[in-house]
Image: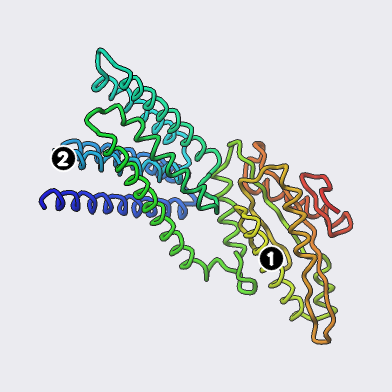
Amino acid sequence: MENIMEITVIIITSLLIIMGIVAIDYSIRTWIDKVNGSVVLKRWLIWLRVVIPIVAIVMIDLNYSDATDIWGRLTGYSVEISIACYFIVHVHDKLFVYATDCMALVVMLFNISVYFPAVPNYQDFGRLLLSLFGVLLTIFINHLIYSYDVFKIRSRVRFFVIICLYSMSWWSILSLNQTFSGYDLLAQMVASIVNISIILSLDLVFRKQLESLTHEIDADFLTQIGNRKAFEFAFQQLFNKYEKRQHDWYLVMLDIDDFKQINDQFGHIVGDTALRRLSKEVNLQLYDLQLDASFFRIGGEEFAILLTHIDESHLPQIIEQLKTTVGRIDVTTNGEQSVKISISMGVAKYQNHDNSAAVLYERADSYLYAAKKDGKNSVNYEGNKLIK
């Protein structure tokens, strides 16, 4: 009974630590978003986001290392793995990635120095190889998440597989510790998967709450997609995140052709209906294509899409599908007349020489102008006609 109570206290404490870490991180993220003028303060806050998980992991390790019960120490490791995974997903800082890589290597070397026998047998060498595999897998997953944001995917199966692999990699490293049985390691591997799922689910809940709180402010009154203010914020955030990094992302600007003529000929009600229909259909198409995309109305009949994690070879097909979707839209007037709409698009890919978000925006805007000048219902990608 006493052991059950001790285990219960350990689990509750672990969950409270995880919830506290998520809450603190969200507070810092909010401060970073609000700091616009001071580059120095923003840099310090970003560094704070990197330091906090490292300090938390060290403190948890010191706290649980004194635990007499082996389950307590294992639970401490499980919480540390969960925190490392959470911040690898969200911090996107090379320093933290390298720090986590070093942590994995240090843990393996420490376990070798303490637990690897002077006269090893085949089983000992098997544990050593498993631990080395765990270090390599941990480093690979750390850099995979950092480079490609693999957690921003809609496939829950793939999402779960990555969590399982991350948990397995760390517990493979810890397998050198011969005081842990195979059952202990397997049980804590499952516990780590549960903890990581909890911490990322909490993050999702917080994010949904923030989105619901800001929706009224950031939503366009007519179309209910993001407005100009939301676009400028998201665009700058994306630029800051991937500045000087080898990561493909795109700004797509699109404009309804001859929209003024539609308003003048059929009235503003038909024009407003066209704007709402386009917003709805394009949003649905972006979702159906399972793209990491954000869609905004930035003024009048002008819209913008932020696209990330897309291979350049797939871009023409995506653009064609969006144009086809818009081309199928029929807006019916009071006189039962069917009005078709078309769009022109300007697409700019982020380049390392784009030294500000404004430079990238101006390029995309110039490509949109070129597409309109080229006869409308066309796409200009980086100064070249993509689709007509």
The vertical placement of 200 against 221, above or below, is above
In the displayed image of the protein, which residue is found farthest to the front?
122
The vertical placement of 232 against 95, above or below, is below
Question: Under tag 2, what secondary structure?
Answer: loop
- Residue wearing tag 1: 299
Residue 93: x, y in percent? 46, 38
Report the side of 351 relative to 229 (left or right).
right
Q: How many marks?
A: 2
Residue 319: x, y in percent? 75, 53
The three-letter code of the residue at mark 2 reads Asp
Q: Residues within 10 Å of mark 2 (few under 14, many from 20)?
A: few
The three-letter code of the residue at mark 1 reads Gly
Question: Residue shown at 31%/54% (left/top)?
Answer: 19
In the displayed image of the protein, which residue is found farthest to the bottom?
335
- Residue wearing tag 2: 69
Question: Under tag 1, what secondary structure?
Answer: strand
Report the side of 51 relative to 325 (left or right).
left
Question: Residue shown at 47%/45% (left/top)?
Answer: 161
CA gap between label 2 and label 1 equals 63 Å
Closest to the observer: 121 or 294? Answer: 121
Residue 62: x, y in percent? 21, 36
Which mark sits nearer the N-terminus, 2 or 1?
A: 2
Closest to the observer: 359 or 209? Answer: 209
The vertical placement of 238 against 323, above or below, is above
The vertical placement of 64 against 112, above or below, is below
Report the side of 243 relative to 26 (left or right).
right
For the C terminus, the quadrant is: bottom right
